[in-house]
Image: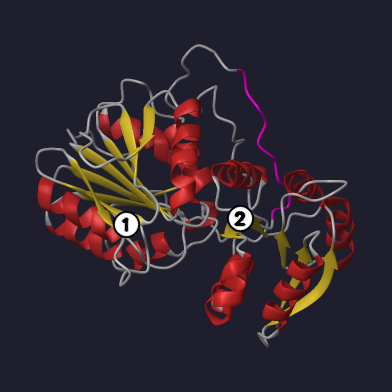
Amino acid sequence: MAVKVLVVDDSGFFRRRVSEILSADSNIQVVGTATNGKEAIDQALALKPDVITMDYEMPMMDGITAVRHIMQRCPTPVLMFSSLTHEGARVTLDALDAGAVDFLPKNFEDISRNPEKVKQLLCEKVHSISRSNRRFSSYSAPQPQPAAAPAPSTSSFSSTARSAPAPTPARAPAAGPASPAPKRKAYKLVAIGTSTGGPVALQRVLTQLPANFPAPIVLIQHMPAAFTKAFAERLDKLCRISVKEAEDGDILRPGLALLAPGGKQMMIDGRGAVKILPGDERLNYKPCVDITFGSAAKSYSDKVLAVVLTGMGADGREGARLLKQGGSAVWAQDEASCVIYGMPMAIVKANLADAVYSLDDIGRHLVEACL
């Protein structure tokens, strides 16, 4: 059955071009278009699409407001289009907080210059998020929280976190047997890799960590170069630990999370120093979870705790294999709490997971394992 798509954009050219690209795929059907957020809500209610592509800046009602209303009234996977600027990154992160599943750069030059590449990427995204766990029987949009409050227990979220507890997917698979609580160990590094759904997932995990978290953390999120600085800044404001975009020569230290810069690769050496390398065009992912995991395995042997969160594909599997061979621990997010059960599934199917946890439990278990 074809994936039904609603295309929302105030630009007539962009609506037509996106509709043409999607309609060229025999397994995608564009069922309608809308020119602003209000029309998008009405069309979503009337047409019940499987996926909505959404622009941000539109008259009458912007895309983020529309996403919030859609998630409340007819939860539907939303793919945002975003400009490759710092402001575009901030807006896109707000849209993901509001409930959007994923995003693509809105680049008119790419559409003209590389139409086949754009077509492939857009159609792949639409097919992938149509299968996501983003149709909820009820979706709780993130609510702002007080800026300051006493430190909560390790089993609850930071008071500064903006994400609400994860809603239960109406069609999510039944959870498997729960993994036991982790054993405490003196880890020298916590490494977390993720892709689609990762920005919100990382926010949920990291806001549960106390300021005195004893292990250094590295984060690998598939994200364009223009976005990672803004994302690191957002996490730093929300978390009790410190978060920054990694730079070449940064030194790992407890209570600091370093986010791999978009478009590049991040490696760790045995002295605890970070190496930032140019993105290799032969690699699909820049940054690549396998690259960072592999370097951590070489540098820290059995003293790494790796976590693979929601995302498409299998990035992280081979790096996790190297970590396991060295005696390190690997955790995977469970299927029910993933937006896209791709990367964690690759870990589980390869028998590399020491534990499989729900997203809401991972932060608490990190504290139990490391403190």
User: Measured from the top left, where is residue 273 in percent x and y?
Assistant: 17, 39
Q: Give SS at disc 1.
A: helix
Q: Give SS at disc 2.
A: loop
**Foreground of the two, 176 or 332:** 332
Q: Which quadrant of the figure contains the C terminus?
A: top left
**Foreground of the two, 114 or 336:** 114
Kind of residue sitting beneath label 2: Val
Q: Residue at x 68, y 86 (%)?
A: 24
Residue 190 falls in which quadrant of the image? top left
Residue 113 falls in which quadrant of the image? bottom right
Q: Is residue 143 magenta?
A: yes
Kind of residue sitting beneath label 1: Val
Query: Which residue is denoted by mark 1 in the rendering?
Result: 289
Query: Which residue is denoted by mark 2 in the rendering?
Result: 101
User: Measured from the top left, where is residue 181 in percent x and y?
Assistant: 33, 39
Q: Which quadrant of the figure contains the N terminus?
A: bottom right
| Most common SS among magenta residues | loop
Quick check: 249 left or right of 125? left
Quick check: 371 left or right of 112? left
Q: How many marks?
A: 2
Which badge, 2 or 1, comes first in the chain's sequence?
Answer: 2
Q: Gap in Å between the C-alphas at discs 2 and 1?
A: 20 Å
Q: Is residue 176 magenta?
A: no
The magenta segment: 136-146
Disc 2 crowd, CA 10 A, few/some/many (<14, 14-19, 20+)? many
User: Measured from the top left, where is residue 148 in percent x and y?
Assistant: 55, 14
Disc 1 crowd, CA 10 A, few/some/many (<14, 14-19, 20+)? many
Residue 325 visible = yes
User: Measured from the top left, where is residue 54 in percent x and y?
Assistant: 72, 58
